[in-house]
Image (spheres, grey):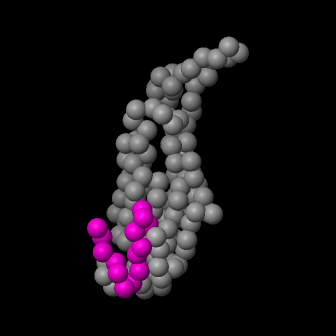
């Protein structure tokens, strides 16, 4: 990682809501209001396993990809060359599209020499995984 020169940061929009609830579990998400009975079709915020479920879904999405670090709904792409960076981003965007995941463009940064990720500044001069 010390030789990486190109960085991108991807933020999944509304992370939890992007994970579909399994058909057999939909009834477990039910709630009632004065007007109606509702079931969630997408994972709502506030359920006990939401964080773990989203993390597992992102890990599955990224399985076998090198140069991508994830933390819940934030992704960091880091490569040594521009060609490798474009290839990694292309693969990532294809996987995101296939999984029907969307990103929040205003919180994304593509092809930078420096990036702030989880409160740490990453650049080709000071990259350290901790």
Look at the picture and state if 119 lies above or below 2.
above
Q: Main secondary structure of the magenta part?
A: loop
Q: Residue 17 is drawn in which quadrant?
A: top right
Question: Of residues 44 and 56, which is closer to you in this image?
Answer: 44
* Residue at 42%, 62% in the rendered image: 118
Q: Is residue 8 visible?
A: yes
- Is 112 positioned to the left or the right of 34 in the image? left
Quadrant housing the N terminus: bottom left
Queried whether the magenta region covers residue 83, the answer comes back as no
Inspect the magenta stretch and tell me whether residue 118 lies in it: yes
Please provide percent x and percent y for residue 35: 71, 15
Is 41 situated above or below 103? Answer: above
Q: Quadrant of the C terminus?
A: bottom left
> Magenta residues, as a range?
117-130
Residue 30 falls in image quadrant:
top right
Residue 83 placement (x, y as % from top left): 47, 84
Q: x, y percentage for residue 93?
A: 53, 64
Q: Nearer the viewer, residue 25 or 52?
A: 52
Q: Is residue 79 above or below residue 108?
A: below
């Amino acid at each position: 990682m010390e030789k990486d020169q190109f960085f991108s940061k991807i933020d999944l929009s509304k992370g939890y809501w992007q994970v579909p609830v399994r058909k057999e579990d939909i009834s477990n998400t039910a709630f009632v209001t004065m007007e109606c009975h509702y079931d969630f079709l997408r994972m709502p915020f506030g359920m006990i396993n939401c964080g773990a479920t989203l993390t597992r879904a992102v890990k599955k999405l990224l399985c076998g990809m090198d140069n991508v670090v994830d933390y819940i709904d934030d992704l960091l792409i880091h490569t040594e060359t521009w060609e490798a960076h474009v290839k990694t981003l292309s693969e990532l965007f294809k996987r995101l599209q296939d999984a029907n995941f969307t990103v929040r463009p205003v919180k994304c940064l593509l092809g930078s020499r420096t990036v702030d990720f989880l409160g740490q500044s990453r650049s080709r001069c000071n990259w350290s995984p901790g």
